[in-house]
Image: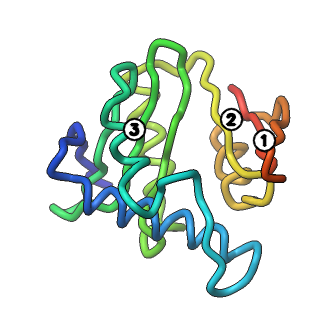
Amino acid sequence: MKLTYRKMTEKDEQMVTKIFTESFNYDTALHFGKGAEDGPPGYSDGRLFKRLLANQEADSLLITRADKIIGIIAINPEIREVLYFCVLPECINQGVGSAVWKDIEDKYGKDYWRLETPSYSLSNHHFYQKNGFKKTGEKEYPEGGRSYIFQK
């Protein structure tokens, strides 16, 4: 699978916000039912994109296949943390995520990675475990949400 990557720029706000919105809502609806919508603060209105773009420690990349932007991955290579990893729902279960993760490890190294994902996101859990991650902790949020910490 031929994927290419480029750094996000300000002009990508609309596309990245679309990817955030569709991927987070897709994942939420899998657990809570059709029409359910949820994600991190600002995921659907551009605020999350702006925070990510302003994060000087992050390598925030657009994922492209056949000249179409199909996802994003944002990592902090210094502390080996995956900040966001989203692909458009129509690209799920096509090997895109595994190909991206292989490319990330080839570029940044395989040793130690950390990430956080919602506790209800069983498909994410399966994906990360398939790629060598193990659940190592939990995090509670004031509004009642819970996430799991995965590491490899």
Q: Residues within 10 Å of mark 2 (few under 14, many from 20)?
A: few
Quarter of the image holding residue 39? Answer: bottom right
Earlier residue among tags 3 and 2:
3
Residue 58 is situated, as x and y percent measured from the top left of the image, at 39, 26
Earlier residue among tags 1 and 2:
2
Residue placed most toward the observer, 152 or 27: 27
Res 127 label: none
- The CA distance from mark 3 to mark 2 is 29 Å
Residue 43 is situated, as x and y percent measured from the top left of the image, at 47, 56
Q: Circle 2 is placed at which residue position?
A: 132
Residue at 48% of width from left, 40% of height from top? 101
> Callout 1: helix, strand or loop?
strand
Residue 8 is situated, as x and y percent measured from the top left of the image, at 24, 42
Q: Is residue 32 above or below residue 130?
A: below
In this view, which residue lies farthest toward the bottom? 34
Res 51 label: 3
Q: Are marks 3 and 2 in contact (CB under 8 Å)?
A: no
Residue at 46% of width from left, 66% of height from top? 21
Q: Amino acid at mark 1?
A: Tyr
Q: Nearer the viewer, mark 1 or mark 2?
A: 1
Q: Nearer the viewer, mark 3 or mark 1?
A: 3
Residue placed most toward the observer, 28 or 131: 28
Residue placed most toward the observer, 97 or 19: 19
In this view, which residue lies farthest toward the top? 78
Q: Residues within 10 Å of mark 1 (few under 14, many from 20)?
A: some
Q: Circle 1 is placed at which residue position?
A: 148
Q: Say left or right for 90 vs 34.
A: left
Quarter of the image holding residue 111? Answer: top right
Residue placed most toward the observer, 12 or 65: 12
- The CA distance from mark 1 to mark 2 is 15 Å
Q: Residues within 10 Å of mark 3 (few under 14, many from 20)?
A: few
Q: Amino acid at mark 3?
A: Arg
